[in-house]
Image (spheres, grey):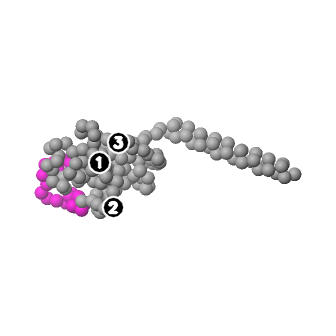
Amino acid sequence: MFMHLKVVFVEEGMEDFVVYCDASISGLGAVLMQRGHVIAYASRQLKPHETRYPTHDLELGAVVFAFKIWRHYLYGVRCIIYTDHKSLKYLMDQPNLNMRQRRWLDVVKDYDCETLYHPGKANVVADALSRRAESAPIRDVCLRLTMMAPVLDTIREAQAEVVISENRKRERALSQKKHDML
């Protein structure tokens, strides 16, 4: 299965990150966005023992999965987590948690995030990633693009050169038309 990315967005600064997470009976999926643009996708199949987890544990597992993969983006910055499981919003206040939930909440507490409910029908990308069939053995799939400042500067310079070149061509064409009219 091939994935074609038509538009690539490079993160700008370290704020306004939004993570959409979802879990299904077959996998975990997450999308990292910034200002409405996708920065990265991630998904993985469930391990055999994880298939027996209750739904709320799987949904929390999807959040932890996203935090571990995108730690370099999310650690130390304010972010919003959207999930289609309402109970995650109130999990921090629950008195009775199992050991897995306590361990995972320790990971979540390291991040400055707000968890919000996002209906499952609206959470289509993360939902699709969590249900995506893998042809290979269980493995993590993460697509991301990180560009260093010199690479970005080179890209911007090349784009500026193209604009200048196109403007010169237009000017030559206009002057040729004026010359032909005389």
User: Where residue 165 is drawn, which disc sits there?
Assistant: none
Give 90 or 1, whichever is nearer the viewer.
Answer: 1
Q: Quadrant of the N terminus?
A: top left
**Few, some or many residues within 10 Å of mark 1 (<14, 14–19, 20+):** some
Judge from the rendering whether residue 91 lies leftward or rightward of residue 4; answer left or right.
left
Residue carrying label 2:
122
Magenta stretch bounds: 86-109
Residue type beneath disc 1: Arg
For marks 3 and 2, the one nearer the N-term is 3
Q: Nearer the viewer, mark 3 or mark 2?
A: 3
Residue carrying label 1:
132
Residue type beneath disc 3: Met
Estimate the x, y position of residue 108 in percent, counting from the top left: 25, 50
**In this view, 94 is above or below 153:** below
Residue type beneath disc 2: Ala
Provide the secondary structure element on which disc 3 rests. loop
| Residue drawn at the location 31% of the way across and 52% of the way down | 128
| Residue drawn at the location 35% of the way across and 50% of the way down | 31
